[in-house]
Image: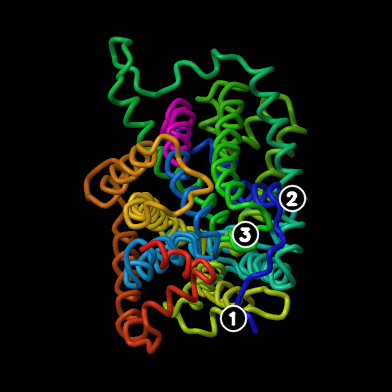
Amino acid sequence: MSQTLRKSLNFTTLVMLGTAGVIGSGWIYTTSSFFKEYGAGGVVFGMLLASLLASCISLAYAELASQFPRAGGEILYTFIAYNRKMAFVIGWLLIGAFVSTTAFYMAAFGSLLTKGIPSLKPILESIPLYSIADSQVYLWGLLAGITLVMFFYMLNTRSVDVGASTQKILFLIKLALGVALATAGLALGDWGNFWPAFNSIEPNGSVSVVSDALSTMRFVIPALTFLTGFSVVSLLAEEANISPKKIGLAIVLTIILAGAYYGLVLLGTAKILPWQNSAAMEFGAISTFTSAGYPILGYAAMSIAFLGMATGSLGIAMGCSRIIFAMGRGGLLPEWLGKVNKNGVPTNALTMTLILTLAFGWLGKGAMIWFLNTGGVYIGLSWVLTVACMYKVRKLYPNNTRPYQTRFGWLPFIGALGAVGIIVMALVPGTSMSLSTPEYYILIVWLLLGTIFYNSYTRRSSVSQETSLQNMLGDRYTDIQNLK
């Protein structure tokens, strides 16, 4: 049986899958805490800066995905540009990042249900199990999260078309609701509610530019985690039934649409009421629009939260399974993970994604926030390495056809430079963006587990590095060999 994924995704579907996977749920009901911590200016301008950085980096993804439209994304590019060891490292980090996201959705679903449907709270919180990271885990809330991930697991195992069709419908509804919120906030709100945009007013009434800039930079880290899903498009490249150039265009368009969506809804939320008032509320944009006298828009914001959790769960699980599939096909993980069923669906990889999600999701929302923050570091590292791969592939294969070529070759470097700065500030203790103590331990343990697995399995694999690369590249392997 050929271990090739079925090609069925058109351009529109690919963009919708990518954008829907990027736009999650937590941001819509945590805008209050964001405004309180960073100021409305820090949130809006930080999201704009993060979107610009991600857009620059997406150009590298677009160029590489158009050249090598095969499952694996960053893992494949790293294998081509460097070697199997580096490919394993980036794959291991990506699994950690993607599973952290799917497990967070599982852990947080019960809490979201109690916020959206208060009448369910007595039921969902009737049987407390344990508390981790100051977050109580309840039996029925946990079962609700398990039900969510199981439902989307079954959708994804049927075929990519079933999952894609579901994702398109959910995305279009979410898009319409987001446009309604942004339009109402921008048209009916007042700029006086947004300015002054920061908390940093000195005793003499002057504005602290340095403090404002730091608030903006600090928000870039959570903003980048909101934008991580665009790489799903490159992971699904093998299943796209479109030209390679359009695959590259889909990647860039995905991040532009997602960044605009986030930025406009956040700005509308900051304008509809004085953002200082919103910062004191409990449920972010949901409470803000309701308090502003637009309860229907409050319900729309709540609907975005539910839809974001659904599309995020579906899209990230789809992407994670393709990472695992590609690593299995290339001999970086056990070979059976690189198998597909008769419909061209990587069911084994999907099952492993489910197992990992269930294994982490029981820890609860509080602990999963730790994992999300370390996942942001993993994603940042993968972005930087992918940009490096673009330049390295250009050098190794200067005559290789680039259906989508980045016109301004320095832009990905600028994006990578920004990502490096943020990663350093997250890893170095004592900065305003440093990881917490548990997060450092999580990062170290995940790297140690990866080292153990690589040395005990991947390095000892009987499959040669050339065969591994050939399996991952398919027909493109002969093409690049002829270019050496």
Q: Which structural element holds mark 3?
A: helix
| C-alpha distance separating marks 2 and 1 | 29 Å
Is residue 437 visible to us here?
yes
Q: Which residue is mark 1?
A: 339
User: Which circle, 2 or 1, is nearer the viewer?
Assistant: 1
Label 3 to label 1, Cα distance in Å? 23 Å
Check residue 152 for magenta coloring.
no
* Residue 88 coordinates in the image, percent (x, y): 37, 71
**Which region shows up in magenta?**
38-54
Residue found 48% across the figure and 27% down from its top: 40
242, above or below 271, in the image: below
Q: Earlier in the sequence, mark 2 or mark 3?
A: 2
* SS type, badge 2: helix
Reading the image, the residue beneath label 3 is 313
Q: Is residue 143 left or right of residue 50?
A: right
Using the image, determine if residue 71 lies above or below residue 234.
below
